[in-house]
Amino acid sequence: MTGGTRLRRGRALGIDLGSRRIGIAVSDSAGTMALPRGTVVRTGDADRDRRALVELVLEAEAVVVVVGLPLSLDGSRGPAATAAGTEADALRVLLEDHGIPVELFDERLTTVTAHQALAAAGSSERKRRSMVDETAAAVMLSAWLEGSGGQR
């Protein structure tokens, strides 16, 4: 599923799944802008990582979770997109008792955009590496908010 309609006002939490780090972004309560929120370093234990994400969702009082779907440039689903779908499904199960939906959203080029934005802001290469995941999550979540996903 890409996009969707939010039924309640409130924060959206964006997730950019990386192999080593998971970038997190959160919208303001009006759903007008997305801000980087940090990263979750993967532990090698998928269940533990998912529980950490659920804690962040609940702490942020998010009403929807948006997981970046890394489609190939031609729009096809490769291994990374398949893995993102699996992660989104697992989070959907964990969050269903809380009534929080999980959506997938096309995140093509968000990491490139995040690197460019951080470089333009004068961030050093080392600083960019540490911030790119959460910045990519914010870029993806901003695009979701601007599109049909952010409409109430």
Image: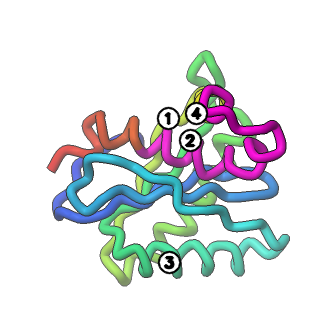
Q: As drawn, is 49 to the left or to the right of 56? A: right
Report if the CB atoms under discs 2 and 1 are less than 8 Å apart: yes
Q: Is residue 72 magenta?
A: no
Q: CA distance from mark 3 to mark 1?
A: 22 Å
Highlighted range, magenta: 118-141
Mark 3 or mark 1, which has the lower sequence index?
Answer: 3
Residue 22, position in %: x, y?
Answer: 67, 58
Q: Badge 2 is on which residue?
A: 69
Check disc 1 and give the amino acid type: Asp
| Residue 110, numbered circle | 4
Q: CA distance from mark 2 to mark 1?
A: 5 Å
Q: Badge 3 is on which residue?
A: 94
Report if the CB atoms under discs 3 and 1 are less than 8 Å apart: no
The residue lying at 54 percent from left, 35 percent from top is: 107
Q: CA distance from mark 2 to mark 3?
A: 19 Å
Q: Could you say whether the residue bearing mark 2 is in a helix, strand or loop?
A: strand
